[in-house]
Image: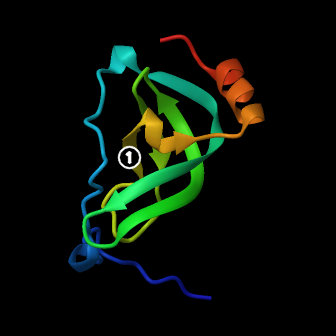
Amino acid sequence: MTQELLAWDAHAAVWQCVLNEQRIPHRRAQRSCDLPVPVTARLVWEHDGEEHLETVAWAWTSRSVLVEVHDRRRQTIGVWLPARDVRRPASAGQRLAQTASSP
């Protein structure tokens, strides 16, 4: 089995902005997870519109959540979204609180 190596901008023609993306919050405001937390994220793509993605959260603030996005439409694998656009099961909420590291 061979694996094709692609340039970092191989998918540049299909990149899109995530319209509900938030600015990266100050590091002191960020809370990290020791383990990823399963979530459903609402993404609003520039051309493709709204999408609900089953993914994981890696960090959060009082207003934003960093979620993982593996999609060729996106240049990076993480995006900060408004907390209102990220949902988690009740059991994952407990896990999120338990796995948080102190800043």
Query: Where 102 falls versus 39 (above or below)?
Result: above
Most extreme residue toward the right is: 91
Q: Front-most of 82 and 13? A: 82
Query: Where 27 falls versus 15 (above or below)?
Result: above
Give the number of callouts. 1
Query: Where 62 falls versus 88 (above or below)?
Result: above
Neighbourhood count class around disc 1 (C-alpha, 10 Å): few under 14, some 14–19, many 20 upward = many
Most extreme residue toward the bottom is: 1
* Residue 53 located left or right of residue 65: right
Q: Position of residue 88 (x, y in %)?
A: 64, 40
Q: Residue at x 26, y 54 (%)?
A: 19
Give the labeled residue for mark 1: 79
Q: Position of residue 101 (x, y in %)?
A: 58, 17
The quarter in which the N terminus is drawn is bottom right
Most extreme residue toward the left is: 13
| Colouring convention used in this rendered image of the protein | rainbow
Q: Position of residue 67 (x, y in %)?
A: 48, 45
Q: Quadrant of residue 30?
A: top left
Query: What kind of element bears circle 1?
Result: strand
Q: Residue at x 51, y 50 (%)?
A: 41
Q: Position of residue 86 (x, y in %)?
A: 51, 42
Q: Quadrant of residue 6?
A: bottom left
* Residue 10 located left or right of residue 32: left
Q: Residue at x 54, y 11 (%)?
A: 102
Q: Residue at x 33, y 63 (%)?
A: 74
Residue type, mark 1 in image: Val
Q: Front-most of 52 and 55? A: 52
